[in-house]
Image: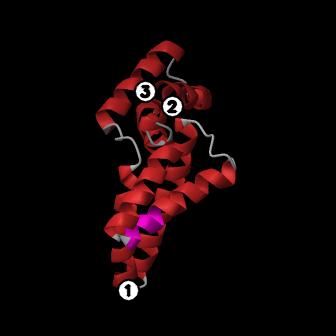
């Protein structure tokens, strides 16, 4: 089952249950995919990238809303973020990312000039399960 098919099923379910928030989020995610490819033919990795980008935007919105004292907006956006996270694969723990990073460092050497290559190697091994920012932070700590 493709990502678009999953989203279509989710849209149907949300419509039957009259769950407007879930329906809106599923439609937004589908729109993100269709903006990239009008036929909805995107790989699992591409869809995860799109969804992670949207989740990051929502997290920033939550942070800004809380700082501005707009708690109602923050609560609504948190609910939306929770739905988006259901469509993302579970993220690896910091320990698991560190383990993959240490393996890459053993393989390529502990050299800050190879940071980009190390990032590419670790992200290539972990795929969509690891957030790039988390990998960057862990590599910076290990290379320090």
- At horizontal 50% and vertical 38% (from top left) the residue drawn is 2
Residue ID for mark 3: 101
Q: Position of residue 108 (x, y in %)?
A: 53, 16
Tell whether position 22 is magenta.
yes
Rounded to the nearest whole Å, what is the CA distance between mark 1 and mark 3? 39 Å
Question: In the drawing, what numbered circle is on residue 123?
Answer: 2
- At horizontal 39% and vertical 85% (from top left) the residue drawn is 70
Q: Quadrant of the rendered structure where residue 101 is?
A: top left
Give the class, few, some or many, for how many residues have Cα within 10 Å of label 2's Cα (few <14, many ≥20).
many
Question: Where is the C terminus found, in terms of image quarters?
Answer: top left
Q: Position of residue 36 (x, y in %)?
A: 68, 49
Tell whether position 111 is magenta.
no
- SS for tag 2? helix
- At horizontal 36% and vertical 31% (from top left) the residue drawn is 98
Residue ID for mark 1: 69
Rounded to the nearest whole Å, what is the CA distance between mark 1 and mark 2? 37 Å
Q: Position of residue 44 (x, y in %)?
A: 52, 37
- SS for tag 3? helix
- SS for tag 1? loop
* First of labels 3, 2 by sequence position: 3
State the extent of the magenta-drawn residues as a range: 20-25
Prevailing secondary structure class for the magenta stretch in the rendered image: helix
Q: Quadrant of the rendered structure where residue 131 is?
A: top left
Name the foreground residue: 137 vs 66: 66
Q: How is the image coloured?
A: secondary structure
In the image, residue 133 sits, relative to residue 14, either above or below, namely: above
């Amino acid at each position: 089952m493709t990502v678009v098919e999953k989203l279509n099923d989710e849209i149907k379910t949300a419509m039957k249950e009259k769950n407007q928030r879930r329906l809106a989020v599923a439609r937004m995610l589908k729109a993100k995919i269709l903006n990239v490819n009008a036929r909805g033919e995107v790989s699992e990795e591409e869809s995860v990238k799109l969804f992670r980008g949207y989740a990051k935007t929502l997290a920033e919105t939550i942070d800004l809303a809380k700082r501005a004292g707009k708690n109602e907006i923050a609560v609504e956006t948190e609910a939306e973020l929770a739905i988006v996270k259901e469509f993302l694969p579970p993220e690896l723990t910091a320990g698991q990312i560190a383990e993959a990073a240490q393996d890459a460092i053993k393989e390529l050497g502990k050299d800050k000039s190879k940071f980009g290559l190390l990032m590419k190697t670790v992200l290539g091994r972990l795929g969509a399960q690891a957030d790039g920012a988390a990998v960057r932070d862990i590599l910076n700590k290990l290379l320090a």
